Image (cartoon, grey):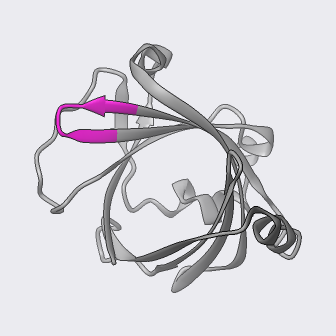
Amino acid sequence: MQEIERKFLVQSLDFMMEAVQFEKIAQGYLNSTPERTVRIRIKDKKGFITIKGQGDETGTTRFEWEKEIELYEAEALLKLCETGVIVKTRYIIKKGNHTFEVDIFEGENKGLIVAEIELSDANEPFEKPNWLAEEVTGEEKYYNAYLSKNSFTTW
């Protein structure tokens, strides 16, 4: 139940040519404190509830629990969420033994593009595509829970 993830800004749309799939995502937060977040997500036509704990000192590792729920349940719970539902399109890119998830944000966060890679170890090496820019792992302002309250367009 540990999530080990690194996060990067994206400097070009070149990744789109490498994408093996994409999906629309809407997500909101029932709780978005740094100690724990409770997220409701609709990904295409599936619902999910996710609980995440506070990250370690680097922001790379944290507790994560996720469960698929019925779509109607996710739709109802999304209506109970805090203000600031995130809408984005996620692109899936395979690089070697790893998968990058690249999110292009919409609405109040339009203009922000972030890539994430999940690892089995915090120091695991991986191939960095040329479309990756600055690493922002552990920077709170790039967390979706933060973006739901402090939109990118207001920075």
Q: Quadrant of residue 56?
A: bottom left
Where is residue 118 drawn, in percent x and y? Answer: 31, 54
Where is residue 10 drawn, in percent x and y? Answer: 45, 30
Choose between 30 and 147: the one closer to the eye.
30
* Residue 14 located within the stretch drawn in magenta: no
* Residue 98 located within the stretch drawn in magenta: yes
Where is residue 99 drawn, in percent x and y? Answer: 31, 40
Q: For the image shown, how many numbered marks are present on the structure?
A: 0
Q: Residue at x 44, y 13 (%)?
A: 17
Q: Is residue 120 above or below residue 66?
A: above
Where is residue 107 drawn, in percent x and y? Answer: 80, 40
**Residue at the extreme bottom:** 35
Q: Is residue 26 above or below residue 62?
A: above
The stretch in magenta equals: 93-99
Q: Is residue 12 above or below residue 108?
A: above
Q: Residue at x 51, y 86 (%)?
A: 35
Q: Quadrant of residue 106?
A: top right
Q: Mainly helix, strand or loop, the magenta region?
A: strand
Q: Is residue 71 above or below residue 88?
A: below
Which quadrant of the rendered structure holds the N terminus?
Answer: bottom left
Q: Residue at x 15, y 62 (%)?
A: 121
Choose between 49 and 53: the one closer to the eye.
49
Q: Residue at x 88, y 69 (%)?
A: 79
Compared across the picture, whether 46 is left or right of 76 comes to left
Task: Examine the rendering and report whether any part of residue 155 can be seen.
Answer: no
